[in-house]
Each structure stands twice: as structure tokens, then as C-alpha cells.
Amino acid sequence: MPESSRPQRLRKLVQEVAGKPAPEDEQESLFESGLLDSFALPDLVSAIEKEFAIKVPDSDLNPRKFDSIARMDAYLADHM
Amino acid sequence: MASYLHAFGAHLPERVVTNAELAERTGKTAEWIESASGIQERRWAAPETSIAAMGVAAAESCLKTAGFPTNKIGMLIVASGSGARGFPGPAAAIADRLCLLSVPAIDLPMASAGSLFGLALAMRLTETYGDILVVASEKMSPLCETEPIDPNTAILFGDGAGAALVSSRPGRWRMLDASLHTDGQYREDLACDGTSLRMNGLTVILQASRKMPASIEEVLARQNLSAQQVTAFLLHQANLNLLTRVAKALNVGPEKIFANVQRYGNTSSASMLIAATEWAEASPGKGPIVFSAFGAGFHWGALVADSAD
């Protein structure tokens, strides 16, 4: 079975945290669309840390970095 | 020299403001308000009730519980983020009403973390000042009623005051250690100009959900304690969902996190001492207790104490 791409893995995490399907558009804001709220964001960051075996430092805890699948992917590209 | 916590006290206004009442004002449903915050109702003070008046009531409640005479107080520390801008702050008014006419009275113009910072400062100052009364008093309701009403903040806040007596004399809990932190780069994400409040909820919750557990673990590690050994966590009552996440991050059951935010809402700096008052009145078991708060600034930290006997 081919390995999932990073955006696919991120989409799966978003779906697990939101309990709803993630948007097809990777640029779509997960917060402005109402898919995620402020209390889902810490859960999403924790899920990303676990899935990708990274530690997001406090200085990177900026909601804009996790606002869409594309932004999360860009963040991970810079930190993995 | 060791410092001890002797007693807590609280004052809450009589008027109960339900979610149903706020639903009309904010355009949200009562169910949404409870789901988003865990809050079912809060107390709002009468227009003529001052921050100082609520602080005095909490102080007197604390001193009555402690059985300690007001005129033996060596220092007064008053936290309030909702106090009027300018000088003097409410510490002078509270000192005057308590007839404390020559002891130093210090204002901490800090919101949610103010009472934690007050306790930590008092812990370090008892050697010089003896018995220190820490008061936190907040009148948040005017900010909730300012037009245009922001539903995301108007649903959260309540009014009230709390107090604690800290002393060099042996008392009920020995204060062991505290860690205090500030990161001013987020100062605009939660701020009040005296008439309106603005909050970037995403940033506040994300930072608080990380920093509160981290500061608690920091201070516990220094005392060779684990979160599982703690009898109770007495936290700033910001939001029930945040308290739940702190418990999860610390890997402790939610029953260890004392919560009364459901009945009083977020009373900013007063909330931690109001929670401590109710917890102490319920004849709690012995063992380590942890205080922690996070708020505008951002200021945050934790303090650990243990039963003295």
C-alpha cells in the first residue's frame, strides 16, 4: 500500500479532531469555516506532534500556522 | 523562612445572571453558551458596587475564617485587572476600609493571573511583613455590557472577589514553591482598555492549554512531586473546557481539578481564590495542592503547597 502523503495524513488528523470531514480545499480556513473551534486547536497541535514525532515549541503556537491543511503542511516542511 | 496559607475568603454578588438571560443579549442559545464554556450562570454586581467593596467583603470573610484580627495585617496585596485606570488603585481604598492606615498596600493591575502572582509574592515577603492579606477583586460585568456586545467574551465573565491570608506563622498549608512567567509578545491578544475587552480566543486557549500544565509540571518537578500525588488543583476558572484539557495534559482525573466556573463564570483574578475558598470549606483531604493561572499579558505560573500537619 502506498504511503500516505503529508497532506493526506493532516486531513485525517483534522477529521479525527473535528469529527467531521476535512475540506477538500487545502487552503480553506479550518477556523473561519467553523470546522474547528479554539478548544479543538490544542488537540490538533497535539495530534500533529504525535503523528509526525515533532515538538511544536511555544514560540510556534500561532493559530495562523495551523489555520489550513496547506499551512500545516508548510510548517511541517520547515520543521521536519 | 517558610510561609503558610492560613485561610481563604470570598464574596459573590447576589444577582444571578443565567445563560438564558445572556442568550437574549448575545444572540446565542443558552445551550451553546454552556457547551462553549461550561458556564451555567454567573454573578453580576449592582452598578453601585465597587471593586473595593467586594474586595473588603472577601477580606473580611477570609480574616473571620482565619480568626485573625485585621489590625495585625502587615501588608495588603490587591490584584484587579478590571479596576479603573489611573491612580490610586483599589489597594488604597481597601486598606482604608479595613482601617489599615500605615501598612504597605500594593496594587497588582493584573487580570486572571493576578491572585497567583499575589500569593507568590506574599510567600516571599512574609519574613519582612509577617501576615500578608492577598485580595483579588473583579467587576467584569460592565465590560460584558458594553456595546457592541462581543458574544464570545460577554458570555464568560462574572463579578466577585477572593482573599487569602499568607503568614510566616505556621498554618494550614505550607507554601513550597512557585514559578511565575510573562511573555509580553501576546499582550494585545487579551486586553482591556477600561471600557471594552478584546480577546483572540484561538491564541489564548492554545497558549493557556500548554503553559498552565507546563508551569505546574515545572514547579512539581522541583519539589519531586508528580501530578498524581496532588490532592487538588485550584486553578483560574477560565472555562470548563480549558480545565478539562489541563487535567488531560497532566494525566489526572477531572475530579482533582476543582471547578466552580459553572456557577460563577470567569471572575478573572478573583476566580482562583473563590475556588480555593469553596474547596477549603468542603473539608478537603490532606496532601499537596497546586494553584495555577494564565491570563492577559500573557502572565502565567503555578504554586504548590502542602498540608502543614
Image: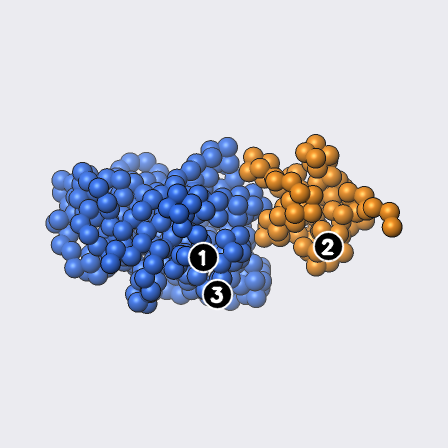
Chain colours: A orange, B blue
> Disc 3 residue type?
Gln
Q: What residue would you read off at disc 1?
A: B228
- Of all chains, the one bearing label 1 is B
Q: What residue would you read off at disc 3?
A: B40
Residue closer to the observer: A59 or B179? B179
Residue closer to the observer: B101 or B47? B101
Q: CA distance from mark 3 to mark 1?
A: 29 Å
Mark 3 or mark 1, which is nearer to you? 1
Q: Check disc 3 and report its element: helix, strand or loop.
A: loop
| Residue pictured at 70% horizontal, 40% vertical | A72
| Residue pictured at 24% horizontal, 46% vertical | B3
> Disc 1 residue type?
Gln
Query: How many numbered badges does the structure rendering display?
Result: 3
Mark 2 or mark 1, which is nearer to you? 1
Tag 2: Cα neighbours inside 10 Å, few (<14), some, or many (≥20)?
Answer: some
> Disc 2 residue type?
Gln
Q: What residue would you read off at disc 2?
A: A15
Q: Quarter of the image for the N terminus of chain B: give it.
A: top left
Q: CA distance from mark 2 to mark 1?
A: 32 Å
State left or right for residue A24 relative to residue B139. right
State left or right for residue A48 relative to residue B41. right
Residue closer to the observer: B213 or B94? B213
Q: CA distance from mark 2 to mark 3?
A: 30 Å
